[in-house]
Image: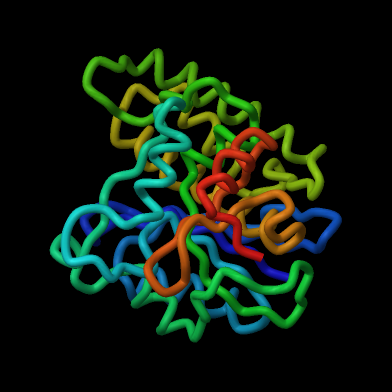
Amino acid sequence: MRFLGVDLAWGTRNPSGLCAVEGDSKGGRVVDSALRRTDSELLDWLWPRTRGPCVVAFDAPLVVTNRSGARDCEREISRCFGRFDAGCHPSNLTRMPDPRAARLADRLGLDTDPVFPPGDESVRRAVEVYPHAALVALFGLDRTLKYKAKRGRSVASRHAEFRRLAGLLATLAEGAPGLDVRAAPRWAELVATATTSAVGAELDRAEDEIDAFVCGYAALLLWTHGTGRSRIVGSARDGYIVTPVTPELARHLDAAGQRVS
């Protein structure tokens, strides 16, 4: 099986991060990663990796039906994960009349319904994920890691948070399923850049690519365990976000009626 992570930029000015995982229910390894900008560049990279069974996890809205405001799934994720600084930005048809992730999924011939039997080796799906929430749930964080560029954050503080992130992602090798991120051809280079470069743009590019690793693992986790270890917040009709969960987060989302099986 192939599991792809796509940290998708909203437009073509900024690069999108890409990650390819090969694996099965026991685990996987990252076999490739990259940065691309235009839709054609993204499709050129994704096409050969999505011809067979695959789950592609986009950090970008896939299903948007609301004209304004936020989607219900974004509001629920913010209610559940806001205390961890992992609230969502609102998506609507006014801001994005033609959602880029949906357009790419359509070109790749991928179904966007997130519900499928765990371990289905014939599935070809695109799902929406959210790395901030995923990291909180996967590693039991009290707050999101502060590696993204924000006013008041120093390069040194970003380096420290990237070191934390790299260390946590390396521990996924012992997970169920496991993921060997260090097998990625560019992993050592990405970590070196993210933890030593003094150039903000280089840190941003490393961030985009590393976030795609998180997306890829979210895809592998959903395929392996279904809603046993993840929740589908929202619906394929009105918009949804797939997120890993802890038992506590699962109870919160289940109480809000968000479990889909």
The answer to whether 93 appears left or right of 42 in the picture is left
Outermost residue on the right side: it is 26
Residue 225 in sight: yes
Residue 138, by quadrant, is: top right
Residue 177 in the image: above or below residue 53: above
Residue 221 in the image: above or below residue 141: below
Residue 38, by quadrant, is: bottom left
Q: Residue at x 74, y 45 (%)?
A: 180
The answer to whether 214 appears left or right of 98 in the picture is right
Provide residue 116's location: percent of width, then percent of height.
67, 73
The answer to whether 162 appears left or right of 152 in the picture is right
Residue 232 in the image: above or below residue 122: above
Query: In which quadrant of the rendered image does the N terminus lie?
Result: bottom right
The answer to whether 142 appears left or right of 204 in the picture is right
Q: Nearer the viewer, residue 19 or 129?
A: 129
Query: In which quadrant of the rendered image does the C terminus lie?
Result: bottom right
Provide residue 135's location: percent of width, then percent of height.
56, 36
Residue 213 in sight: no
Q: Residue at x 22, y 61 (%)?
A: 92
Residue 19, by quadrant, is: bottom right
Q: Nearer the viewer, residue 12 or 196?
A: 12
Residue 197 in the image: above or below residue 72: above
Name the colour scheme: rainbow
Q: Nearer the viewer, residue 196 or 25?
A: 25
